[in-house]
Protein backbone atom coordinates (compact mmCIF):
# COMPACT_ATOMS: atom_id res chain seq x y z
CA UNK A 1 0.00 0.00 0.00
CA UNK A 2 1.15 3.55 -0.68
CA UNK A 3 1.78 6.17 1.87
CA UNK A 4 -1.31 7.94 3.19
CA UNK A 5 -1.28 11.62 2.26
CA UNK A 6 -2.31 14.31 4.71
CA UNK A 7 -5.26 16.12 3.21
CA UNK A 8 -6.10 19.64 4.47
CA UNK A 9 -8.87 18.39 6.83
CA UNK A 10 -6.46 15.84 8.33
CA UNK A 11 -3.80 18.51 8.79
CA UNK A 12 -6.29 20.70 10.64
CA UNK A 13 -7.29 17.78 12.88
CA UNK A 14 -3.67 16.98 13.76
CA UNK A 15 -2.94 20.61 14.53
CA UNK A 16 -5.97 20.81 16.82
CA UNK A 17 -4.85 17.69 18.72
CA UNK A 18 -1.35 19.09 19.09
CA UNK A 19 -2.74 22.39 20.36
CA UNK A 20 -5.00 20.63 22.84
CA UNK A 21 -2.15 18.52 24.17
CA UNK A 22 0.07 21.58 24.40
CA UNK A 23 -2.66 23.44 26.26
CA UNK A 24 -2.94 20.61 28.80
CA UNK A 25 0.84 20.60 29.28
CA UNK A 26 0.91 24.35 29.69
CA UNK A 27 -2.01 24.17 32.09
CA UNK A 28 -0.29 21.48 34.16
CA UNK A 29 2.90 23.50 34.09
CA UNK A 30 1.01 26.60 35.22
CA UNK A 31 -0.59 24.60 38.04
CA UNK A 32 2.81 23.44 39.26
CA UNK A 33 4.06 27.01 39.14
CA UNK A 34 1.03 28.20 41.12
CA UNK A 35 1.47 25.51 43.76
CA UNK A 36 3.44 26.43 46.87
CA UNK A 37 4.18 22.77 47.48
CA UNK A 38 3.27 19.64 45.55
CA UNK A 39 4.24 16.03 46.15
CA UNK A 40 3.10 13.42 43.61
CA UNK A 41 5.29 10.56 44.90
CA UNK A 42 6.13 9.69 41.29
CA UNK A 43 9.68 9.39 42.57
CA UNK A 44 10.77 7.43 45.60
CA UNK A 45 10.33 9.36 48.85
CA UNK A 46 13.61 8.15 50.35
CA UNK A 47 16.11 10.97 50.73
CA UNK A 48 13.37 13.59 50.38
CA UNK A 49 11.06 12.63 53.26
CA UNK A 50 12.55 11.86 56.68
CA UNK A 51 11.29 8.87 58.65
CA UNK A 52 11.19 9.33 62.43
CA UNK A 53 13.88 7.37 64.19
CA UNK A 54 11.99 7.07 67.45
CA UNK A 55 11.60 3.43 68.52
CA UNK A 56 7.82 3.53 68.86
CA UNK A 57 7.38 4.46 65.19
CA UNK A 58 8.30 1.08 63.72
CA UNK A 59 5.81 0.97 60.82
CA UNK A 60 7.41 0.56 57.40
CA UNK A 61 6.64 3.19 54.75
CA UNK A 62 6.76 1.97 51.13
CA UNK A 63 6.73 3.56 47.69
CA UNK A 64 3.95 1.56 46.02
CA UNK A 65 1.43 1.81 43.20
CA UNK A 66 -2.22 2.34 44.02
CA UNK A 67 -4.16 -0.87 43.36
CA UNK A 68 -5.29 -0.95 39.73
CA UNK A 69 -3.23 2.09 38.72
CA UNK A 70 0.27 2.97 37.56
CA UNK A 71 0.24 5.95 39.94
CA UNK A 72 2.59 5.74 42.94
CA UNK A 73 1.90 6.88 46.49
CA UNK A 74 3.22 6.66 50.05
CA UNK A 75 1.95 3.40 51.55
CA UNK A 76 1.29 2.31 55.14
CA UNK A 77 2.41 -1.30 54.70
CA UNK A 78 1.85 -3.00 58.09
CA UNK A 79 -1.02 -3.42 60.52
CA UNK A 80 -1.06 -2.28 64.15
CA UNK A 81 1.93 0.04 63.90
CA UNK A 82 2.81 3.65 64.59
CA UNK A 83 4.09 5.67 61.66
CA UNK A 84 5.86 9.03 61.47
CA UNK A 85 7.42 10.76 58.46
CA UNK A 86 8.03 14.42 57.65
CA UNK A 87 8.90 16.65 54.70
CA UNK A 88 10.36 20.14 55.22
CA UNK A 89 9.17 22.93 52.94
CA UNK A 90 11.64 25.10 51.08
CA UNK A 91 10.13 28.16 52.74
CA UNK A 92 7.53 28.55 55.54
CA UNK A 93 3.97 29.28 54.40
CA UNK A 94 2.12 32.13 56.14
CA UNK A 95 -1.59 31.75 56.82
CA UNK A 96 -2.57 35.30 57.67
CA UNK A 97 -3.27 37.70 54.83
CA UNK A 98 -4.33 35.57 51.87
CA UNK A 99 -6.09 32.35 50.99
CA UNK A 100 -4.34 29.04 51.54
CA UNK A 101 -5.54 25.67 50.23
CA UNK A 102 -4.47 22.38 51.83
CA UNK A 103 -5.25 19.28 49.78
CA UNK A 104 -4.23 15.62 49.62
CA UNK A 105 -5.51 12.24 48.49
CA UNK A 106 -5.97 9.18 50.66
CA UNK A 107 -7.05 5.71 49.65
CA UNK A 108 -8.03 3.19 52.34
CA UNK A 109 -7.34 0.13 50.22
CA UNK A 110 -8.20 -2.31 53.04
CA UNK A 111 -10.79 -0.12 54.75
CA UNK A 112 -10.33 1.70 58.04
CA UNK A 113 -11.67 0.23 61.27
CA UNK A 114 -9.37 1.97 63.71
CA UNK A 115 -6.74 4.48 62.74
CA UNK A 116 -5.93 7.87 61.30
CA UNK A 117 -5.07 9.08 57.80
CA UNK A 118 -4.54 12.78 58.50
CA UNK A 119 -1.70 15.24 57.91
CA UNK A 120 -0.02 17.60 60.34
CA UNK A 121 1.17 20.98 59.09
CA UNK A 122 4.09 21.69 61.41
CA UNK A 123 5.45 24.92 62.82
CA UNK A 124 9.11 25.89 62.25
CA UNK A 125 11.70 23.81 64.09
CA UNK A 126 12.40 26.76 66.39
CA UNK A 127 9.19 25.70 68.12
CA UNK A 128 11.08 22.69 69.49
CA UNK A 129 11.20 19.66 67.22
CA UNK A 130 13.59 17.83 64.87
CA UNK A 131 12.71 15.79 61.76
CA UNK A 132 14.37 12.58 63.01
CA UNK A 133 12.64 13.02 66.36
CA UNK A 134 9.21 13.75 64.86
CA UNK A 135 6.42 12.40 67.10
CA UNK A 136 2.95 13.22 68.42
CA UNK A 137 4.36 16.01 70.59
CA UNK A 138 5.89 17.91 67.68
CA UNK A 139 4.13 21.30 67.54
CA UNK A 140 1.81 21.78 64.58
CA UNK A 141 -0.27 24.64 63.32
CA UNK A 142 -3.05 22.61 61.63
CA UNK A 143 -4.09 18.96 61.66
CA UNK A 144 -6.40 17.89 58.85
CA UNK A 145 -7.76 14.60 57.52
CA UNK A 146 -9.78 11.45 58.24
CA UNK A 147 -9.79 9.60 61.56
CA UNK A 148 -11.93 6.62 62.49
CA UNK A 149 -12.03 4.33 65.54
CA UNK A 150 -15.00 3.14 67.56
CA UNK A 151 -17.46 6.01 67.93
CA UNK A 152 -14.99 8.42 66.27
CA UNK A 153 -15.69 8.92 62.57
CA UNK A 154 -14.68 12.37 61.38
CA UNK A 155 -12.54 14.41 59.05
CA UNK A 156 -10.52 16.41 61.59
CA UNK A 157 -9.73 20.06 61.28
CA UNK A 158 -7.81 21.23 64.35
CA UNK A 159 -5.73 24.36 64.62
CA UNK A 160 -3.46 25.44 67.45
CA UNK A 161 -3.58 29.11 68.40
CA UNK A 162 -1.54 31.08 70.87
CA UNK A 163 -3.47 33.04 73.48
CA UNK A 164 -1.90 36.54 73.43
CA UNK A 165 -2.68 37.02 77.12
CA UNK A 166 -1.34 33.75 78.53
CA UNK A 167 1.06 32.67 75.79
CA UNK A 168 -0.48 29.20 75.92
CA UNK A 169 -1.23 27.25 72.72
CA UNK A 170 -4.79 25.94 72.65
CA UNK A 171 -6.24 23.27 70.30
CA UNK A 172 -9.47 24.38 68.62
CA UNK A 173 -11.52 21.55 67.10
CA UNK A 174 -14.03 21.97 64.30
CA UNK A 175 -17.54 21.17 65.58
CA UNK A 176 -19.67 18.64 63.68
CA UNK A 177 -17.01 17.72 61.09
CA UNK A 178 -17.95 15.56 58.06
CA UNK A 179 -17.71 11.78 58.23
CA UNK A 180 -15.07 9.63 56.56
CA UNK A 181 -16.21 7.89 53.33
CA UNK A 182 -16.70 4.20 54.12
CA UNK A 183 -15.47 2.68 50.84
CA UNK A 184 -12.00 1.72 49.56
CA UNK A 185 -11.78 4.32 46.80
CA UNK A 186 -9.38 7.23 46.44
CA UNK A 187 -10.76 10.39 48.03
CA UNK A 188 -9.36 13.90 47.96
CA UNK A 189 -9.65 16.14 51.03
CA UNK A 190 -9.48 19.92 50.67
CA UNK A 191 -9.38 22.68 53.32
CA UNK A 192 -9.72 26.25 52.06
CA UNK A 193 -8.70 28.98 54.52
CA UNK A 194 -9.92 32.45 53.50
CA UNK A 195 -8.62 35.82 54.77
CA UNK A 196 -12.18 36.72 55.85
CA UNK A 197 -12.01 33.97 58.53
CA UNK A 198 -14.00 31.48 56.44
CA UNK A 199 -13.12 27.79 56.37
CA UNK A 200 -14.46 25.38 53.78
CA UNK A 201 -13.98 21.61 53.94
CA UNK A 202 -14.38 19.70 50.66
CA UNK A 203 -14.40 15.95 50.03
CA UNK A 204 -13.96 14.97 46.39
CA UNK A 205 -14.53 18.60 45.42
CA UNK A 206 -17.92 18.77 47.16
CA UNK A 207 -18.35 21.16 50.07
CA UNK A 208 -19.17 19.26 53.24
CA UNK A 209 -18.64 21.94 55.90
CA UNK A 210 -18.38 25.71 56.10
CA UNK A 211 -17.26 27.45 59.30
CA UNK A 212 -15.97 30.73 60.70
CA UNK A 213 -12.79 30.72 62.76
CA UNK A 214 -14.17 33.37 65.15
CA UNK A 215 -17.53 31.67 65.76
CA UNK A 216 -18.07 29.86 69.05
CA UNK A 217 -20.68 27.73 67.23
CA UNK A 218 -18.07 26.32 64.85
CA UNK A 219 -15.07 25.58 67.09
CA UNK A 220 -14.59 24.05 70.52
CA UNK A 221 -13.27 25.76 72.53
CA UNK A 222 -14.05 29.07 70.92
CA UNK A 223 -11.06 30.98 69.55
CA UNK A 224 -12.06 34.17 71.41
CA UNK A 225 -12.69 33.42 75.11
CA UNK A 226 -15.84 34.66 76.84
CA UNK A 227 -15.66 38.09 78.46
CA UNK A 228 -16.65 36.73 81.86
CA UNK A 229 -16.04 33.53 83.79
CA UNK A 230 -17.47 32.07 87.02
CA UNK A 231 -15.62 33.36 90.07
CA UNK A 232 -13.50 30.42 91.28
CA UNK A 233 -13.40 31.92 94.80
CA UNK A 234 -17.16 32.30 95.18
CA UNK A 235 -18.87 29.79 97.54
CA UNK A 236 -22.51 28.89 98.06
CA UNK A 237 -23.96 30.34 101.33
CA UNK A 238 -24.80 27.78 103.98
CA UNK A 239 -28.45 28.91 104.18
CA UNK A 240 -29.00 28.72 100.42
CA UNK A 241 -32.00 26.41 99.81
CA UNK A 242 -32.12 24.79 96.33
CA UNK A 243 -35.18 22.63 97.06
CA UNK A 244 -38.13 23.70 94.92
CA UNK A 245 -40.55 21.37 96.82
CA UNK A 246 -40.59 20.25 100.45
CA UNK A 247 -42.83 17.86 102.49
CA UNK A 248 -45.85 19.65 103.97
CA UNK A 249 -44.91 20.09 107.67
CA UNK A 250 -48.62 20.37 108.63
CA UNK A 251 -49.72 17.12 106.98
CA UNK A 252 -50.82 14.27 109.29
CA UNK A 253 -51.10 10.57 108.50
CA UNK A 254 -54.79 9.45 108.37
CA UNK A 255 -55.97 7.18 111.21
CA UNK A 256 -57.02 4.41 108.82
CA UNK A 257 -53.64 4.30 107.08
CA UNK A 258 -52.17 0.85 107.81
CA UNK A 259 -48.49 0.81 106.87
CA UNK A 260 -48.19 -2.84 107.96
CA UNK A 261 -50.83 -4.20 105.58
CA UNK A 262 -49.21 -6.69 103.14
CA UNK A 263 -49.26 -6.06 99.41
CA UNK A 264 -50.82 -9.50 98.68
CA UNK A 265 -53.23 -11.76 100.57
CA UNK A 266 -54.73 -15.23 100.05
CA UNK A 267 -57.71 -15.37 97.69
CA UNK A 268 -60.36 -16.77 99.99
CA UNK A 269 -62.89 -17.02 97.16
CA UNK A 270 -60.73 -19.33 95.08
CA UNK A 271 -61.84 -22.98 94.80
CA UNK A 272 -59.91 -26.06 93.90
CA UNK A 273 -60.56 -26.98 90.23
CA UNK A 274 -62.46 -30.18 89.54
CA UNK A 275 -60.23 -33.08 88.61
CA UNK A 276 -57.26 -31.84 90.61
CA UNK A 277 -54.99 -34.82 91.38
CA UNK A 278 -53.99 -34.30 95.00
CA UNK A 279 -52.25 -37.64 95.32
CA UNK A 280 -50.24 -37.37 92.12
CA UNK A 281 -46.78 -35.75 92.29
CA UNK A 282 -45.81 -33.22 89.61
CA UNK A 283 -42.72 -35.30 88.77
CA UNK A 284 -42.12 -39.04 88.79
CA UNK A 285 -39.16 -41.37 88.30
CA UNK A 286 -38.45 -42.07 84.65
CA UNK A 287 -39.81 -45.62 84.21
CA UNK A 288 -37.53 -46.23 81.20
CA UNK A 289 -34.36 -45.28 83.04
CA UNK A 290 -32.08 -48.11 84.13
CA UNK A 291 -29.19 -48.19 86.48
CA UNK A 292 -25.87 -48.04 84.59
CA UNK A 293 -23.89 -51.23 84.61
CA UNK A 294 -20.78 -49.50 85.93
CA UNK A 295 -22.64 -47.82 88.79
CA UNK A 296 -20.97 -48.55 92.14
CA UNK A 297 -23.28 -47.89 95.10
CA UNK A 298 -20.35 -47.67 97.49
CA UNK A 299 -18.47 -45.11 95.41
CA UNK A 300 -21.32 -43.38 93.58
CA UNK A 301 -24.00 -43.64 96.26
CA UNK A 302 -27.49 -45.02 95.95
CA UNK A 303 -28.71 -44.74 92.37
CA UNK A 304 -31.86 -42.74 91.77
CA UNK A 305 -33.79 -42.65 88.55
CA UNK A 306 -34.00 -39.19 86.88
CA UNK A 307 -37.27 -37.32 87.22
CA UNK A 308 -39.72 -36.58 84.38
CA UNK A 309 -43.01 -34.66 84.28
CA UNK A 310 -45.90 -36.75 85.47
CA UNK A 311 -47.91 -37.55 82.28
CA UNK A 312 -51.14 -37.76 84.33
CA UNK A 313 -50.83 -34.07 85.11
CA UNK A 314 -51.00 -33.15 81.42
CA UNK A 315 -54.70 -33.99 81.24
CA UNK A 316 -55.58 -32.64 84.71
CA UNK A 317 -55.86 -29.05 86.05
CA UNK A 318 -52.96 -29.78 88.35
CA UNK A 319 -51.20 -32.23 90.67
CA UNK A 320 -50.01 -32.30 94.24
CA UNK A 321 -51.27 -30.32 97.18
CA UNK A 322 -53.65 -27.55 96.08
CA UNK A 323 -53.01 -24.11 97.64
CA UNK A 324 -55.02 -20.94 97.41
CA UNK A 325 -53.49 -18.36 95.09
CA UNK A 326 -52.50 -14.87 96.25
CA UNK A 327 -54.26 -11.68 95.15
CA UNK A 328 -53.58 -7.97 95.59
CA UNK A 329 -54.60 -6.61 99.01
CA UNK A 330 -57.21 -3.87 98.53
CA UNK A 331 -56.22 -2.42 101.92
CA UNK A 332 -52.57 -2.03 101.00
CA UNK A 333 -51.33 1.60 100.97
CA UNK A 334 -47.64 1.28 101.76
CA UNK A 335 -45.56 3.70 103.80
CA UNK A 336 -47.16 7.11 104.33
CA UNK A 337 -45.36 10.23 103.14
CA UNK A 338 -46.36 13.82 103.60
CA UNK A 339 -47.39 15.51 100.33
CA UNK A 340 -44.98 18.01 98.74
CA UNK A 341 -45.64 21.75 98.67
CA UNK A 342 -43.77 24.74 97.25
CA UNK A 343 -40.76 25.65 99.33
CA UNK A 344 -41.19 29.22 100.59
CA UNK A 345 -37.40 29.46 101.18
CA UNK A 346 -36.48 28.30 97.66
CA UNK A 347 -33.82 30.52 96.03
CA UNK A 348 -33.05 28.53 92.90
CA UNK A 349 -29.96 26.62 91.81
CA UNK A 350 -26.88 28.41 93.08
CA UNK A 351 -24.05 29.32 90.74
CA UNK A 352 -20.99 31.48 91.34
CA UNK A 353 -21.07 35.07 90.22
CA UNK A 354 -19.38 36.10 86.98
CA UNK A 355 -16.19 38.09 86.97
CA UNK A 356 -14.16 39.54 84.07
CA UNK A 357 -12.10 36.87 82.29
CA UNK A 358 -8.41 37.71 82.73
CA UNK A 359 -7.60 35.63 79.59
CA UNK A 360 -10.10 37.43 77.38
CA UNK A 361 -8.84 39.07 74.20
CA UNK A 362 -10.33 40.46 71.04
CA UNK A 363 -9.22 39.40 67.60
CA UNK A 364 -10.23 40.28 64.06
CA UNK A 365 -8.65 37.17 62.54
CA UNK A 366 -6.66 34.16 63.75
CA UNK A 367 -2.94 34.61 64.24
CA UNK A 368 -1.90 31.32 62.66
CA UNK A 369 1.63 30.05 63.06
CA UNK A 370 3.44 29.52 59.73
CA UNK A 371 3.72 26.06 58.18
CA UNK A 372 7.30 24.90 57.78
CA UNK A 373 6.84 21.15 57.18
CA UNK A 374 4.25 18.49 56.41
CA UNK A 375 4.16 15.41 58.62
CA UNK A 376 2.18 12.17 58.84
CA UNK A 377 2.09 10.84 62.38
CA UNK A 378 -0.53 8.12 62.84
CA UNK A 379 -1.33 4.97 64.74
CA UNK A 380 -3.46 2.51 62.79
CA UNK A 381 -4.72 -1.07 62.94
CA UNK A 382 -5.05 -1.25 59.13
CA UNK A 383 -2.47 -1.46 56.40
CA UNK A 384 -2.99 -0.37 52.80
CA UNK A 385 -3.46 3.37 53.54
CA UNK A 386 -2.04 5.26 50.56
CA UNK A 387 -1.22 9.00 50.59
CA UNK A 388 -0.78 10.88 47.32
CA UNK A 389 -0.79 14.28 45.61
CA UNK A 390 -0.17 16.47 48.65
CA UNK A 391 -0.73 20.10 47.68
CA UNK A 392 -0.44 23.56 49.24
CA UNK A 393 -1.67 26.42 47.05
CA UNK A 394 -2.97 29.96 47.39
CA UNK A 395 -5.88 29.58 44.98
CA UNK A 396 -8.72 27.08 45.19
CA UNK A 397 -8.85 27.04 41.36
CA UNK A 398 -5.38 25.49 41.39
CA UNK A 399 -6.59 22.80 43.80
CA UNK A 400 -9.64 22.19 41.59
CA UNK A 401 -7.34 21.77 38.57
CA UNK A 402 -5.26 19.17 40.43
CA UNK A 403 -8.41 17.29 41.42
CA UNK A 404 -9.50 17.26 37.80
CA UNK A 405 -6.19 15.95 36.45
CA UNK A 406 -4.85 13.70 39.22
CA UNK A 407 -7.78 12.45 41.29
CA UNK A 408 -10.83 12.34 39.02
CA UNK A 409 -9.51 9.85 36.42
CA UNK A 410 -8.45 7.41 39.15
CA UNK A 411 -11.74 7.78 41.00
CA UNK A 412 -13.74 7.14 37.81
CA UNK A 413 -11.87 3.88 37.16
CA UNK A 414 -12.29 2.72 40.77
CA UNK A 415 -15.97 3.66 40.81
CA UNK A 416 -16.64 1.68 37.65
CA UNK A 417 -14.82 -1.35 39.04
CA UNK A 418 -16.77 -1.07 42.30
CA UNK A 419 -20.02 -0.96 40.33
CA UNK A 420 -19.05 -4.08 38.38
CA UNK A 421 -18.27 -5.92 41.61
CA UNK A 422 -21.54 -4.83 43.20
CA UNK A 423 -23.48 -5.90 40.08
CA UNK A 424 -21.69 -9.25 40.14
CA UNK A 425 -22.58 -9.79 43.80
CA UNK A 426 -26.18 -8.75 43.16
CA UNK A 427 -26.38 -11.11 40.17
CA UNK A 428 -24.95 -13.99 42.21
CA UNK A 429 -27.42 -13.29 45.00
CA UNK A 430 -30.29 -13.15 42.51
CA UNK A 431 -29.19 -16.42 40.90
CA UNK A 432 -28.94 -18.07 44.33
CA UNK A 433 -32.50 -16.98 45.14
CA UNK A 434 -33.71 -18.32 41.79
CA UNK A 435 -31.94 -21.64 42.34
CA UNK A 436 -33.50 -22.00 45.78
CA UNK A 437 -36.98 -21.42 44.32
CA UNK A 438 -36.28 -23.97 41.56
CA UNK A 439 -35.10 -26.61 44.03
CA UNK A 440 -38.08 -25.99 46.32
CA UNK A 441 -40.40 -26.47 43.32
CA UNK A 442 -38.61 -29.67 42.29
CA UNK A 443 -39.01 -31.11 45.79
CA UNK A 444 -42.75 -30.45 45.55
CA UNK A 445 -42.88 -32.08 42.10
CA UNK A 446 -41.10 -35.16 43.48
CA UNK A 447 -43.92 -35.54 46.04
CA UNK A 448 -46.59 -35.92 43.32
CA UNK A 449 -48.09 -39.42 43.83
CA UNK A 450 -47.69 -40.74 40.25
CA UNK A 451 -43.96 -39.84 40.42
CA UNK A 452 -43.38 -41.93 43.53
CA UNK A 453 -41.34 -44.52 41.59
CA UNK A 454 -38.94 -41.72 40.52
CA UNK A 455 -38.85 -39.78 43.76
CA UNK A 456 -35.39 -41.01 44.86
CA UNK A 457 -33.96 -40.33 41.40
CA UNK A 458 -35.33 -36.78 41.40
CA UNK A 459 -34.01 -36.18 44.93
CA UNK A 460 -30.54 -37.33 43.81
CA UNK A 461 -30.63 -34.84 40.94
CA UNK A 462 -31.73 -32.00 43.23
CA UNK A 463 -29.00 -32.76 45.77
CA UNK A 464 -26.38 -32.66 43.01
CA UNK A 465 -27.75 -29.31 41.91
CA UNK A 466 -27.57 -27.89 45.43
CA UNK A 467 -23.93 -28.93 45.68
CA UNK A 468 -23.13 -27.67 42.17
CA UNK A 469 -25.38 -24.67 41.41
CA UNK A 470 -24.03 -24.41 37.85
CA UNK A 471 -25.91 -27.66 37.04
CA UNK A 472 -29.30 -26.15 37.92
CA UNK A 473 -30.54 -25.70 34.34
CA UNK A 474 -29.48 -29.21 33.28
CA UNK A 475 -31.16 -30.74 36.31
CA UNK A 476 -34.34 -28.77 35.71
CA UNK A 477 -34.42 -30.04 32.10
CA UNK A 478 -33.82 -33.64 33.27
CA UNK A 479 -36.71 -33.51 35.74
CA UNK A 480 -39.00 -31.97 33.13
CA UNK A 481 -38.08 -34.76 30.67
CA UNK A 482 -38.85 -37.43 33.29
CA UNK A 483 -42.13 -35.71 34.11
CA UNK A 484 -43.23 -35.45 30.48
CA UNK A 485 -42.22 -39.05 29.73
CA UNK A 486 -44.39 -40.42 32.53
CA UNK A 487 -47.19 -38.00 31.63
CA UNK A 488 -47.34 -39.19 27.99
CA UNK A 489 -47.18 -42.84 29.05
CA UNK A 490 -50.15 -42.28 31.31
CA UNK A 491 -52.09 -40.58 28.49
CA UNK A 492 -51.22 -42.81 25.51
CA UNK A 493 -50.04 -45.98 27.21
CA UNK A 494 -47.15 -48.25 26.23
CA UNK A 495 -46.67 -50.09 22.92
CA UNK A 496 -49.32 -52.83 22.64
CA UNK A 497 -48.49 -56.42 21.68
CA UNK A 498 -50.20 -57.88 18.57
CA UNK A 499 -53.30 -59.97 19.32
CA UNK A 500 -52.69 -63.71 19.34
CA UNK A 501 -55.04 -65.78 17.12
CA UNK A 502 -55.65 -69.24 18.49
CA UNK A 503 -56.84 -72.24 16.45
CA UNK A 504 -60.17 -73.70 17.45
CA UNK A 505 -59.79 -76.87 19.40
CA UNK A 506 -62.16 -79.46 20.72
CA UNK A 507 -63.83 -78.67 23.95
CA UNK A 508 -61.56 -79.69 26.79
CA UNK A 509 -62.52 -81.27 29.99
CA UNK A 510 -63.76 -79.03 32.78
CA UNK A 511 -60.57 -79.31 34.80
CA UNK A 512 -58.34 -78.45 31.84
CA UNK A 513 -60.64 -75.54 30.91
CA UNK A 514 -60.34 -74.12 34.39
CA UNK A 515 -56.57 -74.47 34.33
CA UNK A 516 -56.45 -72.83 30.90
CA UNK A 517 -58.65 -69.97 32.17
CA UNK A 518 -56.36 -69.34 35.11
CA UNK A 519 -53.32 -69.47 32.85
CA UNK A 520 -54.93 -66.97 30.45
CA UNK A 521 -55.70 -64.62 33.33
CA UNK A 522 -52.06 -64.78 34.50
CA UNK A 523 -50.80 -64.13 30.97
CA UNK A 524 -53.16 -61.21 30.65
CA UNK A 525 -51.90 -59.69 33.92
CA UNK A 526 -48.28 -60.11 32.79
CA UNK A 527 -49.06 -58.37 29.50
CA UNK A 528 -50.71 -55.43 31.27
CA UNK A 529 -47.80 -55.15 33.70
CA UNK A 530 -45.21 -55.23 30.91
CA UNK A 531 -47.18 -52.60 29.01
CA UNK A 532 -47.33 -50.23 31.99
CA UNK A 533 -43.74 -50.68 33.18
CA UNK A 534 -40.99 -48.62 31.48
CA UNK A 535 -39.02 -50.67 29.02
CA UNK A 536 -35.27 -50.96 29.30
CA UNK A 537 -33.03 -50.42 26.29
CA UNK A 538 -31.28 -53.67 25.31
CA UNK A 539 -27.59 -53.55 24.69
CA UNK A 540 -26.26 -55.69 21.90
CA UNK A 541 -22.87 -57.20 22.47
CA UNK A 542 -20.62 -57.98 19.52
Image: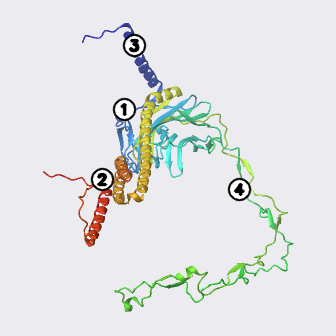
Does 116 appear above or below 315?
above
Measured from the top left, where is residue 65 in percent x and y? 36, 37
Numbered disc in front, either 1 or 3:
3
Snapshot quadrant of residue 534: bottom left
> Which residue is at 79% across, 75% downward?
336
Does residue 80 appear in the picture of this structure? Answer: yes
Q: Which residue is mark 2?
A: 496
Q: Which residue is mark 1?
A: 42
Residue 216 as seen in the image, left or right of residue 541: right
The numbered mark, 4 or 1, whose residue comes first in the sequence reads 1
The numbered mark, 2 or 4, whose residue comes first in the sequence reads 4
- Answer few, some or many: residues within 10 Å of disc 4's Cα (few below 14, many 20 plus, some between 14 and 19): few
- Helix, strand or loop at mark 4: loop
The numbered mark, 1 or 2, whose residue comes first in the sequence reads 1
> Looking at the image, do the residues carrying marks 2 and 4 touch, with CB atoms under 8 Å apart?
no
Snapshot quadrant of residue 106: top left
Numbered disc in front, either 2 or 4:
2
- Helix, strand or loop at mark 1: loop
Numbered disc in front, either 2 or 3:
2
Q: Which residue is mark 4?
A: 233
The alpha-carbon separation of the residues under discs 2 and 3 comes to: 83 Å
Q: Which residue is mark 3?
A: 13
- Helix, strand or loop at mark 2: loop
Measured from the top left, where is residue 383 in percent x and y? 39, 46
> Which residue is at 43% across, 52% downward?
436
The alpha-carbon separation of the residues under discs 3 and 4 comes to: 83 Å
The alpha-carbon separation of the residues under discs 4 and 1 comes to: 61 Å
The alpha-carbon separation of the residues under discs 1 and 2 comes to: 86 Å
Amino acid sequence: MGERKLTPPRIVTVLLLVCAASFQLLRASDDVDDAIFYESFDENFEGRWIVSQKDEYNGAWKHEKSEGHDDYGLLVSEKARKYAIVKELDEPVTLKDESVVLQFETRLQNGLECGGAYLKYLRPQEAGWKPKGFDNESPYSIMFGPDKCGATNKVHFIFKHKNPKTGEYVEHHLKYPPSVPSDKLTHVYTAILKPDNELRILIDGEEKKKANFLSSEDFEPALIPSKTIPDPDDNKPEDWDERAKIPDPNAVKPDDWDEDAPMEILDEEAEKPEGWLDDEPEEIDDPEATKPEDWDDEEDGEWEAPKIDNPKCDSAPGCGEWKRPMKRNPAYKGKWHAPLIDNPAYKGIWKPRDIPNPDYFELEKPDFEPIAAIGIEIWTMQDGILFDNILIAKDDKVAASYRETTWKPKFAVEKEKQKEEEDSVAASSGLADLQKKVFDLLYKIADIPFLSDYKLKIHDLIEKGEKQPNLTIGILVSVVVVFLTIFFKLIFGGKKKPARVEKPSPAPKETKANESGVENEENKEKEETSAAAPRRRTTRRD
